[in-house]
Amino acid sequence: MSHLDQIARAGGGGDGGPPQAKIGPAPTGRAKCSKCAANIEKGTLRATTFSSSAFHDGYDASHYHALCAPASARGSFDPKATLLLPWRDQLTFSSHESQKNDLRSNARAQAASDLFCRTRTALANDCRPKDVKQLVEENGYSLHCGPKPIPLEILVEIAADGLCFGRLPKCAVCGGRALRHAGAEQGSHSITWCTGWASASTPCAFVTSEPPAREACWTGSAGLRKNTKPLRALAALLSEADARARREAPEPEARASKKPRTAPPPPPPLPAVSPRLRPVPTDSRLLVVDPMALQEAGCNAGARDAAIVLTHNGCTAMNVQLTYVDAASETNSFYRLQCFQFERGGFGIFTRWGRVGEDDGLRNYMAGASSAQNKCMLHFHDDLESATEEFAKVFKRHTRQDWAAYAAAREFTHQPGCYDIVRHADAELLADGEAAAPGRPALTDAPLPVDLDGLGVKALKGFCAERGVDVSRCLEKGDIVDALRASAPAVAAPAAETALAAPALPLPESVAQFVELIFSKKRMEDELSRRNVDTSKFPLGEISPACIRAAYAALSAASAALDRPASAATDDVQRARDAQAIQTATNDFLRAIPHQVPRGGMAALRLDNIEVIRQKTDLVSTLEQILKRLQLDRAAPKQAISEAPGDVLRRQYASLKCDLTPVPRDSAAYAAIAGYLRRGWAECTLEAIFEATLAGQTEAFEPHRKSNVHLLWHGSSLSNWAGILSGGLRIAPPEAPVNGYNFDKGLYFADVCAKSAQYCRVHSGAAAVLCLAEVAVGDPLLKRAPDHNSNNARRLSGKDSVVAMGLREPDPSAGYERLGSARLPLGRVTDYAPPEDGPQRYMGHNEYIVYDASRHRIKYVVQCRAA
């Protein structure tokens, strides 16, 4: 491992492992040696190793006397830590022979090390911590790194370096004053690194062995130079720094008269509630108390009526899911915070934490175990005010955001090193132009459950409290139901009038089976689980457009970083910027779409190559289609609390707004399509063919009806078809990365079914769905190799589409046949024989790409099963 590679890994986990072992003077005398069990005295050399924690998503530290450290650690101490040791100890513990050989003959480096260590010892032992912190702040450094304060021993080292050798410049990568230096006067063996943040999710990765250009030595205000006993040692150090910088000490400040007492400032006014907030739906998962919280409270984990989550002003649920991801340090953490009211009376604040994919569900819960073992904690409160106060305090501790401000406007700014909030589908703001009541939305506008009589008294009282319905005089449950219905008669009435009209007659059996197939929630969850998406932390009902947009933005940022030309290896600043752009995009993507990643496996998810970006772009596209399918369900409200299976299928079919007519097996169309399928994908069994009529597609396609129309295949996973049939195929949004597609963002089709079947992602014996679309190819631009700028090239050449010519294609000599207004090839799939001196082809199969959605019309839907 090279010197700079070892430096980069020292930050922790860049290669999937724990941070390197560290060595330095013990800041306190409280630690015990993990080998000999004796106390490690303050100021003596202490070695620290790191291992994966069993109680949190991170690493636990083990401390040793320097000579008791494990042999594996003694040979690989963090080089930044060893360069901060006294020079004689560097000769003992450094693992770089060339550095030790040069140090033995470098008198200037030895003197610089002695000066630094003497100043560090004086600051640590003879100066008050508050004076050291004031000195650090006066010289432009922050006392915090992310949400946590910087340890005092680090501040002491920063101050000692500044007093001895001068102020370090701002970081050229992140722009913050957070540089640190070790190894003064040791030339190329020295290390300068940044401890700031390149973005809210990514620590700055700048590191170089080039000595920095320093400014003058640190100075201190006159208030730190008073000749009093507490400040005498610091004043002496400041005088020495003045002498090294050849400057005059500042004039002492005039003694200020005692300030008169003033009343404390009034608390800031509560923020106004945004008119774009939606009321929390009464059936939202946001109102469901965590089953682990119920077990902690001694309730049955399945008793949902035992408690209900509270809301802030009725519009923001006091139930937040936080996430913190840093792929470089293998951190993939979640933190859940809930405030709820028990049916029996009283309030609870529940917190739960762990690693995404490992600490989910009740399988790790042990009754009677400690909070560290169960990774959860429940606090009881007698009144709402104290519960709300604790909730806001915990929220601010982990996010550095004010809860009241967030709840009022739903605006969240991710702070460096802090948790980010997971955007829930039920917490989306009203869109521009969407109808909303003046001021904050009226809670009475939220829909009531259809079957009020089937709810418990506690749930009914909760609805009454949210809507301001007075039920203090209601003695019976029926009185409460009557009061609720009287408050919103139009809403509480049966929802049959608002539901989408379902077919009066039963669906044909094949259509019913197809609808059940594409609306299966379990199949969607299984598919996402196979692709490492954690559906327990990212349930289907919680997919939100904000998550989709954030994921696309992260993929586009990674794609743009990869498109930039590689910088010179000697340019440490540009190299750090390139690495951080990829790291930030990776962290942002994993925050938007929580993944189950085993420890040590996050390096494989780095968005540092085109293939990974394409895979994740396809995943986000699938999630986008699932979101549309869920929106279809919400657009067709249930007509009763318990629907018959046939009623559910008819409602789901009606929500598609797409007519599906089974194609008779004895028809010419069925025979033509079956042959087309068999010639291109023999390893499948045809189950059903439906003629599809999507709302609005016929009219949109009409101008292109005579523009060289081909009948072509398009395949997609089962979870996508409800969204596809409800609105047709859609071109990727502008925020999606161009590099995620071989021929730019467009609609892709094939004339060989096996090519489209790859996108169905089916295993042996599994169901698959494809469509045959009429595609107006027009006058195409021919391509033989991938080109991410294909759409622009097509536009400049005046062509209508792009045809990518592949190595396997239907035999062109067999000709075509007509099916309606489109033509389909009759030839068997053959290998293309390139001419010896002619142009080559690099694609596996022919692909047809159109960049205008109106140039396609889904004509048939084919249901089959892989062999």
Image (cartoon, grey):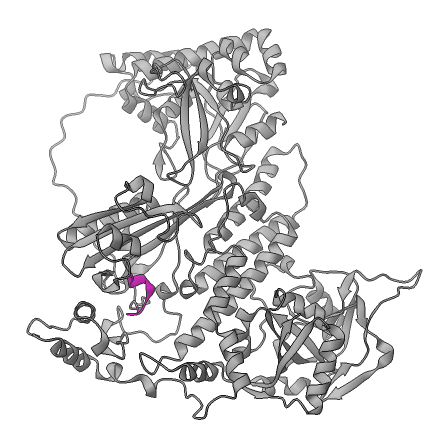
Can residue 777 be seen?
no
Q: Residue at x 33, y 55 (%)?
A: 320
Quadrant in which residue 459 is drawn: bottom left
Q: Position of residue 519 (x, y in %)?
A: 48, 74
Q: Is residue 582 magenta?
A: no
Quadrant in which residue 662 is drawn: bottom right
Q: Residue at x 24, y 71 (%)?
A: 443
Our reading of the magenta stretch's main secondary structure is loop
Nearer to us in this view, 61 or 172:
61
Nearer to us in this view, 314 or 45:
45
Q: Is residue 287 above or below residue 436?
A: above
Q: Position of residue 88 (x, y in %)?
A: 50, 8
Please indicate whether residue 690 sits to the left or right of residue 70 in the image. Answer: right
Q: Is residue 6 above or below residue 557?
A: above
Give the residues drawn in magenta, as a range: 281-288
Q: Position of residue 651 (x, y in %)?
A: 42, 83
Q: Residue at x 47, y 12 (%)?
A: 86
For the N terminus, the image quarter is: top right
For the C terminus, the image quarter is: bottom right
Q: Is residue 543 above or below residue 725?
A: above
Quadrant in which residue 774 is drawn: bottom right
Q: Position of residue 866 (x, y in %)?
A: 65, 70
Q: Is residue 150 above or below residue 282?
A: above
Please indicate whether residue 314 sits to the left or right of residue 474 in the image. Answer: right
Nearer to us in this view, 64 or 823:
64
Extreme right residue here?
Answer: 836
